[in-house]
Image (spheres, rainbow, N blue to C red):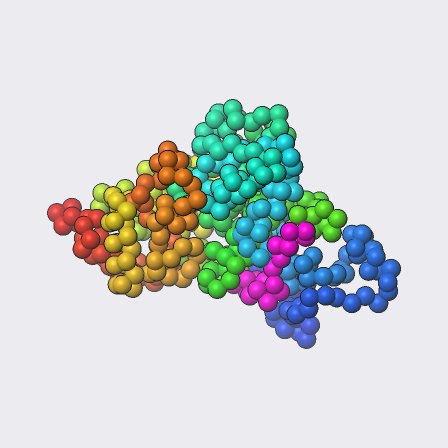
Amino acid sequence: MSFKPADNIQDLQYFGEFGGVNPSISDSSTYTFLKAKTMFDTFEGNTDGCYLYSRHSTPSNLYLGEALAAMEGTESANVAGSGMGAITPTLLQLCGAGDHIVSSRTIYGGTYAFLKNFTPRMNIQTSFVDITKLDVVEAAITKNTKVLYCESVSNPLLEVADIKGLATLAKKHNLTLVVDNTFSPLSISPAQLGADIVIHSLTKFINGSSDTMGGVVCGSTEFINSLKSVIDGASMLLGASMDSLRSASILKNMRTLHIRMKQHSKNASYLAEKFEGLGIKTVYPGLVSHPSHEVFKSMMNEAYGFGGMLTIDAGSLDKANALMELMQEKNVGYLAVSLGFYKTLFSAPGTSTSSEIPQDEQAEMGLSEGLIRFSIGLDDDIERTFNMIKACMIEVGVLQLETA
């Protein structure tokens, strides 16, 4: 049987303290014990079902973690206060002084900055490679390499990682394969393809309403427990905790994730085909022209499509900025970073979400100044949206009338 992540979420049933259809929110920062020995045992990690302190865990966070583990098909999960609050403790739990990471060269700018500028302080080095070339990835592995890191669909260039191929490499060299699946929840299930750890920024599609931050690490029970250890757990000791009220809110939004992802994908696919038909350089995994189109198809849970993210090249930064400003003025969406909102969001990654990457490296990886990253919204009439965007393109000169 094929993996069905939405069914796994739907099959979870929780009752609130007074019979509510939503679980009760645990609005406490600390928890009482009837016996002193139970507190001692909890600190030692020898009790189940007891709560110690909300930085460690709460019932609300465990509900959300359970739902996310079910979605990815992992044994367990630990939620955090942001996506970076999930990424950084994971890498620091896996690596120490003298260790080495092989990472995709196109990743979220914050992750890139952490690996390029911060972890070297702890003598953890990273090699950035073209993740789509398995021979290049393998060539970068050294005797000190501990982690292979990538994004299922990369930010912002939408390169697609061959997770099955990377998992084979990781197993061959005894590495931990960590996959950030933020851009493709439900569409791709990395753990089912061989990934050891799956990370999401819950801020994006999973929450879907651009009103809170969150992150999650999905993996084995052993690894998740190590992250939460009061002795040496990176999540526990770095304090990347999520508030119970926020985790309860995200859990409710997860119930509609399958519906939202289908609409995001449907709309993005329509626009990508239309943009490409106009002769605009368009990158979208659902287009046959995408270099990794077949790789994505081989990994995807078909019902959820190719995701809600696409890019176009406006030709220059000035034209990109003019187009985005006009689209916002015409109510197409918002000139804003992030993704997964019900309205379309657009930004120029080279000067925003990927600005941490030096200009020469941006050019080398193909991140052009005119690149616009779109997070396509849930518009009901996507043809109407296309016509609005097309009119804006003509007005600012991204599209010429004779080609329109």
In the displayed structure image, the side of residue 268 where residue 172 appears, left or right? right
Q: How many numbered callouts?
A: 0
Q: Is residue 242 magenta?
A: yes
Image coordinates of residue 255 in percent, x first then y, are 53, 62
The answer to whether residue 301 of the structure is visible from this angle is: no
Residue appearing at x 22%, y 56% in the figure: 392
The part of the image, by quadrant, that contains residue 334 is bottom left
Magenta: predominant secondary structure element?
A: helix
In the image, is residue 249 above or below residue 354? below
Front residue of 164 and 90: 90
Front residue of 319 and 273: 319
The part of the image, by quadrant, that contains residue 316 is top left
- Outermost residue on the left side: it is 402
Q: Is residue 314 magenta?
A: no
Residue appearing at x 48%, y 25% in the figure: 135
- Outermost residue on the bottom side: it is 18
From which residue to which does the magenta span run?
Answer: 236-253
In the image, is residue 160 above or below residue 388? above
Front residue of 273 and 110: 110
The answer to whether residue 126 of the structure is visible from this angle is: yes
Image coordinates of residue 115 in percent, x first then y, are 53, 40
Image coordinates of residue 266 in percent, x first then y, are 37, 53
Residue appearing at x 77%, y 56% in the figure: 48
In the displayed structure image, the side of residue 375 where residue 243 appears, left or right? right
